[in-house]
Amino acid sequence: MQSTRDALNQNLTVSQHNSSMLYGFDNRSTEIQGSFYLDPEWSTATVRFYPRTIATPKGTIKLDSITDVQMRVVLKGNDVEFNTQEGIKVISGSLIKSFTFEKQGFSVKHYVNTLEFKDESDKIKSGFFEILADGKVKLLDYCTLKIHQPDYVEAFNVGSKDVKINTERQLFIAKGKDVVKFNTGRKSVYVLMADKKPEIEKFVKDKGLSLKDRSDLAKVFQYYNNL
């Protein structure tokens, strides 16, 4: 882990991103509303890399894992930033297999690279899944950017001059390596968990859970995986 930390503190810059502006618009009159980050605040992370050997001023180093590093994910371009002693370092998200985020006052969040799964319908791209529930049937959350370009019409002085950035979250389920999009709702859940439907129905009723709520849905999946 120390060699990995040394690599980050030296010159590990695999790719760059332009999250500060969008080219093609006059930055003096156009503002960007929103963020290109999964979370713009730094989080303490434990990171597991895909095996890779890189060259640094200290010699050849094999990326392995690192703990207690300040990190944030750039959704635009699938880059990851590390806040190191030598400044902010940027690497491609494709180098990271999984990571865990910890923030004071919040629950621990676990993420895994989308490269770990097969998507036959091609609905997911590069990036990371947040694991909401783990087990034989995983419940995964996938976050993408929605960028709304300015629609200002100067001749009529109508529309917006700003670039607006929103995030869109989609749920997926995974059995083994296969992942498919999942629509929330009572019917979808009970069809998926048909082999344990009576138990699931009782659990949902007793706990007063909503199958359209992500946190409640995660509890249902975790319960099902433990049956």
Image (cartoon, rainbow, N blue to C red):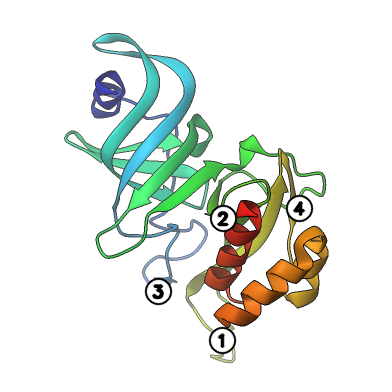
Residue labelled with disc 4: 180
Tell me, yes or no, if residue 149 can be seen here.
no
In front of the other: 147 or 127: 127
Q: Is residue 63 above or below residue 131?
A: above
* Distance in Å between CA atoms under marks 4 and 2: 15 Å
Mark drawn on residue 101: none
**Snapshot quadrant of residue 2:** top left
Label 3 residue SS: loop
* Distance in Å between CA atoms under marks 3 and 4: 42 Å
The answer to which of marks 3 and 2 sits earlier in the sequence is: 3
Measured as percent of width and height from the top left, residue 48 is found at: 42, 32
| Amino acid under disc 1 | Gly
Residue labelled with disc 1: 159
* Distance in Å between CA atoms under marks 3 and 2: 44 Å
Given contact means CB atoms under 8 Å apart, are the residues at marks 3 and 4 in contact?
no
Give the total number of marks visible in the rendering: 4
**Snapshot quadrant of residue 81:** top left
Q: Judge the density around disc 1: few (<14), some (14-19), many (≥20) Cα neighbours within 10 Å.
A: few
Q: Residue at the location (65% across, 61% down)? A: 171
Outermost residue, left direction? 85
Along the horizontal axis of the image, is 221 left or right of 18? Answer: right
Q: Is residue 93 above or below residue 198?
A: above
Which label sits in the foreground, 2 or 1? 2
| Amino acid under disc 2 | Ala
Label 1 residue SS: loop
The answer to which of marks 2 and 1 sits earlier in the sequence is: 2
The answer to which of marks 1 and 4 sits earlier in the sequence is: 1
Residue labelled with disc 3: 29
Measured as percent of width and height from the top left, residue 115 is found at: 63, 36
In front of the other: 4 or 179: 179
Given contact means CB atoms under 8 Å apart, are the residues at marks 3 and 2 in contact?
no
